[in-house]
Image: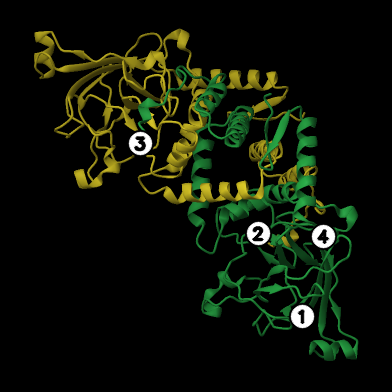
Chain colours: A yellow, B green
Amino acid sequence: MDPSAISIPPLKNLTTENITENVHLINTHNKPSPRLSYVLERLVTHLHDFARETRLSTQEWMEGIQFLTKTGQTCTDVRQEFILLSDILGLSLLVDSMDHPKPTHLGATEGTVLGPFHTHEAHHMSNGASMSHDPEGEPLLVICTVKDTAGNPIRGIKIDLWETDSTGHYDVQRPEVNHGEPDGRCVMTSDEKGCFWFKAIVPVSYPIPHDGPVGQLLLKLKRHPWRPAHLHAMFNGAGWDPLITALYIRGDPYETTDAVFGVKDSLIVDIETVTDENMAREYGVDIGHKLLTYDFVLVSEEESRKLREQQATEALEKLGRRVKIVEGLPVPDLD
Amino acid sequence: MDPSAISIPPLKNLTTENITENVHLINTHNKPSPRLSYVLERLVTHLHDFARETRLSTQEWMEGIQFLTKTGQTCTDVRQEFILLSDILGLSLLVDSMDHPKPTHLGATEGTVLGPFHTHEAHHMSNGASMSHDPEGEPLLVICTVKDTAGNPIRGIKIDLWETDSTGHYDVQRPEVNHGEPDGRCVMTSDEKGCFWFKAIVPVSYPIPHDGPVGQLLLKLKRHPWRPAHLHAMFNGAGWDPLITALYIRGDPYETTDAVFGVKDSLIVDIETVTDENMAREYGVDIGHKLLTYDFVLVSEEESRKLREQQATEALEKLGRRVKIVEGLPVPDLD
């Protein structure tokens, strides 16, 4: 493309007052996709309003530039500092809640933040296998089902599960311990009864990585970096809305002060103990073994799509924005 | 600091509707600096409103995370992709215009975007020296003065000057050409008549670096990456408001479509030719040599501070925000 061949409106003498409308003009002049236009128009408006309402100084702007640069450069194959930033600013929770609305009145399991530690390296495991090899972890038997909102078991759902070791670190944070092999994570498939069960360790609370820019920001805000003990779970299956969630262990000291805003009452679980001899035999554990059970409920893609689009339209109408849904996402309705 | 010793309000069951106020609560609970509190409150509000008004999807959020990560990782010692991003979104121009307001009715020279190519490596040069060693560049004699708004010359002002070579690249973009030595840039000091003069080359238009994430974004927006030909200049001196500006060459094909919104009529200059024999002799050039002259006018720190604070207070009052100025920047006035 010859860049000089692109015509744009005359842009000169831009000021605090007229810069925003002119950026919109140039961004929309050559008609990029309607969704990109809309997202950029909102992004630039909010970015400029943020600067105008704070009268952001050049020095603060430069600190921001350096903060974002360092955040990007702290990211590696196994560390995602921008997701952490999104998490501690509440953006991750917000996006998940809009994108995966749950008809909780029908018993659908609530979602929560993905966090930066999901990987695609986990091995597939069969029912009964152990996903943690940490000898210091307290062994935990986890027995779950996955059903639809009518109570029918769903078979063939792919479930990603991940948690830290007993020191509060994910495998990717301590590759030297497992020689780069995945640990504390696995992928399972629900059986014909919608069941999946496995052996793990009792989750522990841990601080999110706070030796980088996000940790510096938390320190300046005098916020702690801790997350209450939890076990991550993600559900995927054709026709089902992906469920990204986690189970939180009741009574954790950080239960009401999660640094990333993830805790929901419906996701708080008790750690119990195996007391029944038949159960102990069936699952190959001793009496007194720690036990966690949970019944997950998925919603269909169709159900979720309808709810998402309905909520989007209603929320945007409330904000005085007339939109239409195109490919599942709102764009201004200019007709 | 023992993180568990920090008390924060109970945070649980957060939703699209209540997440924002709860992030504010935790961010302000332990009373960080008033300015940080204010900036974060505005940042989180706008970030969340942006997500809510676009109903940002998880996939788009992840694309954003990856875009920001790549932008950070494209930065090096000699490339600042986040400044480029700020430039093409109009934020840089906006921040400069608020932070360095100019009483143009008194003839003060207008500021413009710094850009990502200023360095601290340039050598100091005396009047008459040449800052460009590019044999392909068209030689240009530059004669300037720097004065106050009353027309008095200012001596001892430190002036950073920088421009590209004849191919449109700054020295840091082609270290192999100059073996890492600064070129196309220098630092000068105004003499007792407020004068500084030097030899450069006629500036050329050039595209901002567009082989990275910012270039990708411009492409998606169908925007060109070109900047009209210009010569950067930055003025610093005790008691004077720093002036970051540039001179644009009249008639450039990108004069009205600068990718970073920097052009102002008052900064557009004509390239003339030396016609006077005395002048040619005085400055050691031939008749017909290209010539650029400009008289810069600085405002005092005090003048600038007053104007900045007055504009900030007025603008924020217009927005219905009651603020007071603390250390030069607005914070909410809660009294």
**Residues tagged by mark 4 and mark 2 found on one chain of the structure:** yes
- Asked if labels 1 and 2 touch by Cβ distance under 8 angstroms, the answer is no
Q: CA distance from mark 3 to mark 4?
A: 53 Å
Q: Residue at x 62, y 29 (%)?
A: B49
Q: Is residue A4 above or below residue A78?
A: below
Disc 4: which residue: B109
Q: Which residue is mark 2?
A: B115
Q: Quadrant of the C terminus of chain B?
A: top right
Asked whether residue A294 appears in the rendered view, the answer is yes
**Toward the viewer: A72 or A152?**
A72
Gap between marks 3 and 2, in whole Å? 37 Å
Q: Whole-percent x and y of residue A333?
A: 72, 28
Look at the picture and state if A286 lies above or below B58: above
- How far apart marks 4 and 2 lie (CA) works out to 18 Å
Residue A110, above or below A19: above
**In 3D space, how far apart are the residues under numbered discs 1 and 4 (Cα atoms)?**
22 Å
Q: Nearer the viewer, residue A150 or A217?
A: A217
Q: Are marks 4 and 2 in contact (CB under 8 Å)?
A: no
Q: Quadrant of the N terminus of chain B?
A: top left
* Chain holding disc 1: B
Q: In the rendered structure, find residue A118 and report the number of the disc placed on it.
A: 3
Q: Secondary structure at mark 1?
A: strand
Say what amino acid the circle numbered 1 marks. Answer: Leu
Kind of element beneath mark 3:
loop
